[in-house]
Image (spheres, helix red, strand yellow):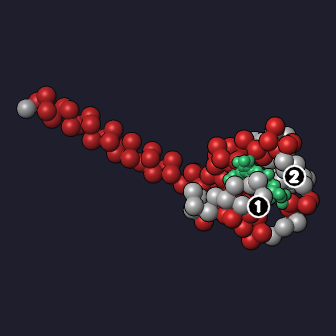
């Protein structure tokens, strides 16, 4: 009896503690979503900084995503390229959710040359 009561008196508070940690950790995700996605899906060609200084980027003349030429396009234009692809740029409409494309566009905006 005693042993069981001891177990729950330790387990219950630590479960509550763990649950609240998880709750706090979740809201932070959307902010970094674009950056993390970009790193895993796009940096192969565009480079982690979006400058396109990769082997593929140079061969296919990928533009610096932070450059004025790219930044002057609307969010809708950039989303369309990511969703539908463009020449050698693969289409991500099937593998990414609209929210993820939005996160990526926001990340591309953060690369704008200052
Ligand atoms: C296989 C290599 C490759 C991958 C992976 C890739 N891209 Fe691209 N991307 C390209 C190429 C090549 C172009 C240039 C297309 C053109 O204009 O002819 C391009 C163009 C773009 C453009 C338009 C830029 C401009 O010049 O107007 C955007 C925005 C873009 N990519 C975003 C992304 C995002 C976001 C991802 C990840 C989800 C991604 N790309 C993954 C190769 C790639």
- Secondary structure under tag 1 reads loop
Nearer to us in this view, 100 or 3? 100
The residue located at (38%, 47%) in the rendering is 19
Nearer to us in this view, 23 or 42? 42
Measured in 3D between alpha carbons, the distance from the residue under mark 2 to the one under mark 1, in whole angstroms, is 13 Å
Image-based side of 30 in relation to 110, left or right: left
Residue 73 percent location from the top left of the image: 84, 67
Q: Quadrant of the N terminus?
A: top left
The residue located at (57%, 57%) in the rendering is 95
Residue 35 percent location from the top left of the image: 68, 48
Q: Is mark 2 within 8 Å of ligand 1?
A: yes
Image-quadrant location for residue 92: bottom right
Disc number placed over residue 86 in the picture, else none: 1
Image-quadrant location for residue 8: top left
Q: Is mark 1 within 8 Å of ligand 1?
A: yes
Residue 79 percent location from the top left of the image: 71, 65
Label 2 neighbourhood size at 10 Å, few (<14), some (14-19), many (20+)?
Answer: some
The residue located at (74%, 63%) in the rendering is 81
Residue 85 percent location from the top left of the image: 72, 61
Instruction: Please name the residue that numbered disc 2 is placed on.
Output: 63
């Amino acid at each position: 009896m005693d042993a069981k009561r001891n177990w729950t008196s330790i387990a219950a508070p630590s479960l509550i503690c763990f649950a609240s940690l998880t709750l706090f950790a979740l809201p932070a995700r959307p902010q970094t979503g674009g950056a993390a996605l970009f790193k895993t899906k796009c940096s192969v060609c565009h480079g982690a900084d979006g400058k396109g200084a990769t082997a593929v980027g140079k061969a296919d003349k990928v533009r610096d995503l932070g450059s004025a030429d790219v930044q002057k396009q609307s969010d809708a234009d950039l989303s369309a390229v990511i969703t539908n692809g463009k020449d050698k740029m693969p289409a991500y409409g099937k593998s990414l959710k609209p929210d993820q494309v939005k996160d990526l566009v926001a990340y591309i905006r953060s690369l704008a040359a200052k």
